[in-house]
């Protein structure tokens, strides 16, 4: 502020010193200086060949506009005149607006410079003298506006304007309507003389229009005429429209005016705001010899209309009596209006604290046999009787909206019976304080096609009898009835042709808990509005059979429960069967789930609105049937990700997407597809895309537009990700391998070899088989088990077999280790006598077993035989000997039998195991 102050101090006059800076800024916003702070227009806008230079405080026409402009708006500037030379660059101008300036004089060269000029607006200036020469070259001029100047006409200023169609010289304090003495303005159509100071129309005032056959409209608003000389309208008897609004002239002058209009072609007469408090049966006598079709008497504070006042107007088609204070309509008030088609009585009969409720007598409208439209909006009438509307044999539309008629509170079959003879199509009972509709209330309205009952207090269960007799009804509007209407299955059984049914903000929350649905008889229904009802109970059959239903409005209800998968009995798929639906609105329902099948088959849907819900994770394919979708509204939900699995189909052909105010997650997985889609979509179908679509997560993008999301970062991710996976896998594998090698290397090798051998059948067994083994088996046993070996094994060596027992067969002179290694190599099989002791014997475990296995692996021999003297757990076995039962062939695993009689069988099996070939394949 301080800085700005300084700047402005140097720029502007000292008198602004004391003003607050804000005001200074505002001054400069409208001032001639360029102001960067504001967006105010600082130069002319040129568009479609028209230059708008208004409101620029210009004191001259800018010389640098395109030469070919046809329109120039210089209004609201500071012109003091229009020097022709300043317009010389624009010879093609057709329309020049110089209103709201300070022009004091029209320059006679103007139209010479602008020979094509058609419209010249010099309204709201200070032109005083106007002479013929000033506009004598304006022969092309069609419209000349000189309103609100200080005109003083000299001679015949307009006589050269042969093509002028519209002349406005209102608000000029003219003392006479006589603009010239010779006939002129032969093309004139519209003459505006409103707000001038003359009070008399003399006989020859309009004689200058003697030869103006096209004159149609004369505006004399706010001209306080006192005297009309006979024959004053004679020269302009072709006049069709006369506007006399606000001309405070009194009843007798009006009568005089009407007599002067007699015999003219007058068609439309406007007498608004004339303080015409009373109409007498003589006021319009003069209009008898006219073909007047439209009379506007609104805003006159009219309290009394004498009987027969309109008898002179048999050709009147439109009568506007709106905004008056009429107390009483009798059967003779409207007498004679036998051509009247439209009677406008909005606020014409009103009740105030100073006056009693107006009365409409029986048969008041009977004279209006041609009346088609009767508007009684915002009126108050004591009561509607059985004959109030009798005789309206052509009535098609009756508007009683926002009126206060006691009899409408509780409508019975008598209330509207006076309309029985009318071919009524539309009845508007909006806002008429209806509480109850009784059976047969509309039964006399056999032709009714539209019934409006919005904004009432209807509080009842619709049994169906209310609409009895409405054979032709197509639309029932019943919105805003304070949610106090209940339905039954038969509610609409009498109106099967219904196409539009509006029940918004009218139904009780439980009104739709019905089966069969109340709508089931309405097979022609196309539009159903159930919005704003807090509906909390519905059935799956709600719209069943409504094969023509196109628009369904369900917003602002309580339907979330019905689409929850946790709902008792599963989600309620209440849209099933509404195949023709084109518009579905379900905003503000608290929805947090959409069942997979909820929108199935809606292939005609063009507009889907789900705004203001709690939707987040949408299931894949839920929208996949919406192939015709054009408009999708999902704003104000909790959507984080927009994935192609969900949105590709519904978004493939949109012309409008509204999805702002969601907490978008701007990561590659969640938003990349969406951002790419947005980028390739016409911005005009995405309102607020820059400002309203914000990232919520991750932190780096928080509160940034989704359009700021860097798509390239995702493209780089792909090779990087692959690399990452590859390298981490390699590291993992290396680690595992190292660990395995470190702790279980031999075992891996063992399995590996066996695997290779088993699958490829590769073996050196043939070589081996031929090799000379000194022993058949090398026996490994614990010290304690030597007696068992003595007793059970040695006896088997009867010349055929030879075992190697370390104690017995060690080579003398050799170290024990060498001897073991040597003997094992010389043995065809290795036989473990497994006991707990063996497993605990470190020597045996560490060396013998290791070596034996090493041998086995090295030679790829399947040469181990295990003899269990005790039951040993496999786990312990593997811990001590690095062997598992599963590693060996079953026949090489033997258990020492507990029962003696099985010992021979054991011997047999042992010999088989020892005799077994070492070849690894079966
Ligand atoms: C006026 O001339 C400009 C070029 O100077 C041209 O772009 C524009 O279309 C013309 N406008 C009209 C209404 O002829
Ligand atoms: C006008 O009303 C007066 C009484 O107020 C009556 O005497 C006269 O006959 C009426 N004139 C016409 C033309 O109805
Ligand atoms: C009114 O209309 C009729 C027929 O349309 C016509 O003969 C008559 O001249 C018209 N009256 C006036 C005053 O224009
Ligand atoms: C409306 O009138 C009926 C009888 O015509 C009556 O039974 C009912 O109570 C009335 N309802 C109200 C709200 O006055
Ligand atoms: C109006 O309803 C009453 C019963 O409520 C019935 O007796 C009467 O005939 C009905 N009148 C008409 C004109 O339908
Ligand atoms: C529905 O509309 C069709 C065609 O407009 C019409 O023939 C039929 O009578 C209407 N009513 C019902 C109940 O189907
Ligand atoms: C959007 O399109 C522009 C050019 O058309 C491109 O430079 C930009 O990277 C695109 N952004 C995304 C998110 O696709």
Image (spheres, rainbow, N blue to C red):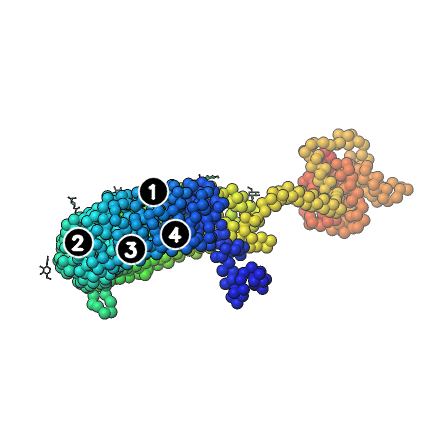
Tag shown at residue 230: 2
What residue does disc 3 label? Answer: 194
Q: Looking at the image, is mark 3 or mark 1 nearer the viewer? A: 1
Against 141, residue 612 (above or below) is: below
Residue located farthest toward the right when viewing the structure as drawn:
813
Label whose residue precedes the other's in the sequence (4 or 2): 4
Against 48, residue 363 (above or below) is: below
Residue located farthest toward the bottom when viewing the structure as drawn:
354
Asked whether the residues under the numbered discs 3 and 1 touch, taking CB atoms below 8 Å apart as contact, a structural biologist would say no
Label whose residue precedes the other's in the sequence (3 or 2): 3
Label whose residue precedes the other's in the sequence (4 or 1): 4
Label whose residue precedes the other's in the sequence (2 or 1): 1
What residue does disc 4 label? Answer: 105
**How far is mark 4 from mark 3, CA to CA?**
22 Å
Residue at image coords 79%, 35%: 799
**Cβ of mark 2 under 8 A from ligand 3:** no
Q: Position of residue 443 (x, y in %)?
A: 19, 53
**How far is mark 2 from mark 1, CA to CA?**
34 Å
**Cβ of mark 3 under 8 A from ligand 3:** no
- Left or right placement of residue 764 versus residue 570 in this view: right
């Amino acid at each position: 502020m301080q800085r700005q102050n300084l700047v402005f101090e140097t720029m502007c006059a000292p008198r602004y010193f004391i003003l607050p800076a804000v005001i200074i800024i505002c001054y400069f916003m409208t001032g001639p200086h360029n102001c960067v702070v504001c967006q105010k227009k600082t130069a002319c806008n040129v568009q479609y060949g028209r230059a708008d230079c208004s409101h620029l405080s210009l004191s001259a026409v800018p010389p640098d506009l395109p030469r070919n402009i046809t329109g120039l708006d210089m209004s609201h500037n500071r012109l003091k005149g229009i020097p022709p030379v300043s317009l010389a660059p624009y010879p093609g101008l057709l329309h020049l607006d110089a209103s709201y300036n300070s022009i004091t004089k029209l320059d006679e060269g103007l139209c010479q410079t602008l020979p094509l000029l058609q419209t010249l607006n010099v309204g709201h200036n200070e032109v005083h003298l106007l002479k013929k020469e000033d506009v004598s070259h304006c022969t092309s001029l069609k419209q000349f506006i000189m309103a609100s100047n200080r005109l003083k006409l000299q001679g015949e200023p307009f006589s050269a304007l042969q093509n002028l169609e519209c002349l406005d010289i209102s608000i000029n304090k003219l003392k006479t309507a006589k603009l010239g003495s010779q006939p002129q303005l032969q093309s004139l159509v519209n003459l505006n003389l409103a707000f001038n100071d003359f009070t008399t129309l003399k006989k020859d005032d309009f004689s200058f229009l003697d030869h103006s056959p096209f004159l149609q409209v004369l505006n004399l608003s706010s001209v306080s005429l006192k005297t009309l000389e006979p024959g004053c309208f004679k020269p302009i008897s072709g006049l069709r429209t006369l506007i006399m609004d606000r001309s405070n002239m009194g009843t007798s002058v009006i009568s005089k005016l009407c007599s002067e209009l007699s015999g003219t072609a007058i068609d439309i007469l406007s007498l608004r705001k004339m303080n015409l408090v009373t109409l007498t049966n003589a006021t319009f006598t003069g209009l008898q010899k006219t073909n007047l079709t439209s009379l506007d008497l609104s805003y006159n504070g009219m309290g009394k209309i004498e009987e027969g006042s309109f008898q002179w107007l048999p050709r009147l088609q439109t009568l506007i009596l709106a905004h008056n204070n009429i107390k009483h309509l009798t059967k003779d008030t409207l007498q004679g209006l036998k051509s009247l088609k439209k009677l406008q009585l909005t606020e014409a009969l009103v009740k105030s604290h100073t006056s009693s409720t107006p009365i409409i007598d029986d048969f008041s409208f009977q004279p209006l046999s041609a009346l088609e439209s009767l508007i009684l909006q915002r009126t108050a009438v004591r009561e509607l009787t059985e004959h109030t509307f009798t005789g309206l044999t052509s009535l098609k539309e009756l508007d009683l909206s926002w009126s206060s008629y006691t009899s409408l509170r509780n409508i019975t079959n008598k209330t509207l019976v006076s309309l029985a003879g009318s071919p009524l199509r539309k009845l508007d009972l909006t806002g008429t304080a209806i509480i109850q509709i009784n059976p047969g209330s509309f039964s006399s309205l056999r032709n009714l096609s539209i019934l409006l009952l919005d904004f009432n207090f209807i509080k009842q269960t619709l049994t169906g009898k209310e609409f009895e007799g409405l054979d032709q009804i197509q639309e029932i509007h019943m919105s805003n009835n304070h949610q106090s209407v209940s339905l039954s299955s038969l509610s609409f059984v009498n109106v099967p042709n219904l196409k539009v049914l509006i029940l918004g903000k009218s139904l009780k929350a439980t009104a739709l808990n019905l089966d069969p649905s109340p709508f089931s008889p309405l097979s022609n229904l196309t539009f159903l509005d159930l919005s704003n009802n807090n509906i909390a109970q519905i059935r799956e059959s709600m719209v069943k059979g409504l094969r023509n239903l196109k628009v369904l409005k369900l917003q602002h209800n309580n339907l979330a429960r019905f689409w929850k998968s946790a709902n008792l009995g599963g989600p309620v798929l209440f849209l099933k069967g509404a195949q023709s639906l084109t518009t579905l609105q379900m905003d503000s329902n608290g929805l947090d789930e959409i069942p997979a099948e909820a929108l199935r088959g809606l292939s005609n849907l063009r507009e889907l609105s789900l705004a203001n819900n709690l939707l987040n994770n949408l299931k894949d394919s839920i929208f996949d049937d919406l192939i015709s979708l054009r408009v999708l509204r999902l704003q104000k939900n909790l959507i984080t990700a927009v994935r192609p699995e969900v949105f590709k189909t519904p978004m493939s052909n949109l012309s409008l997407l509204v999805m702002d105010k969601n907490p978008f997650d701007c990561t590659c997985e969640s938003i990349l597809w969406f951002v790419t889609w947005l980028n390739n979509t016409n911005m005009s179908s995405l309102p607020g895309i820059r400002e309203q679509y914000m990232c919520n997560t991750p932190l780096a993008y928080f509160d940034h537009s989704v359009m700021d999301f860097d798509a390239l970062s995702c493209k780089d991710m792909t090779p990087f990700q692959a690399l990452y996976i590859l390298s981490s896998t390699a590291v993992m594998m290396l680690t595992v391998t190292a660990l395995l090698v470190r702790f279980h290397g031999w075992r891996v090798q063992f399995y590996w070899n066996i695997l290779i051998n088993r699958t490829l059948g590769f073996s050196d067994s043939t070589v081996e088989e031929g090799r000379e083994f000194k022993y058949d088996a090398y026996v490994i046993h614990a010290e304690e088990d030597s007696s068992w070996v003595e007793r059970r094994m040695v006896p088997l060596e009867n010349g055929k077999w030879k075992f190697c027992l370390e104690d017995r067969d060690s080579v003398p002179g050799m170290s024990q280790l060498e001897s073991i290694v040597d003997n094992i190599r010389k043995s065809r099989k290795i036989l473990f006598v497994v006991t707990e002791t063996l497993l605990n014997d470190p020597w045996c475990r560490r060396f013998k077993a290791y070596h034996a296995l090493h041998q086995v692996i090295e030679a790829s021999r399947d040469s181990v035989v295990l003899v269990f003297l005790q039951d040993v757990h496999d786990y312990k076995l593997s811990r001590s000997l690095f062997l598992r039962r599963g590693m060996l062939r079953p026949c090489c695993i033997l258990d020492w039998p507990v029962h003696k009689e099985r010992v021979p069988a054991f011997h047999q099996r042992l010999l088989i195991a020892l005799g077994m070939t070492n070849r690894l394949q079966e």
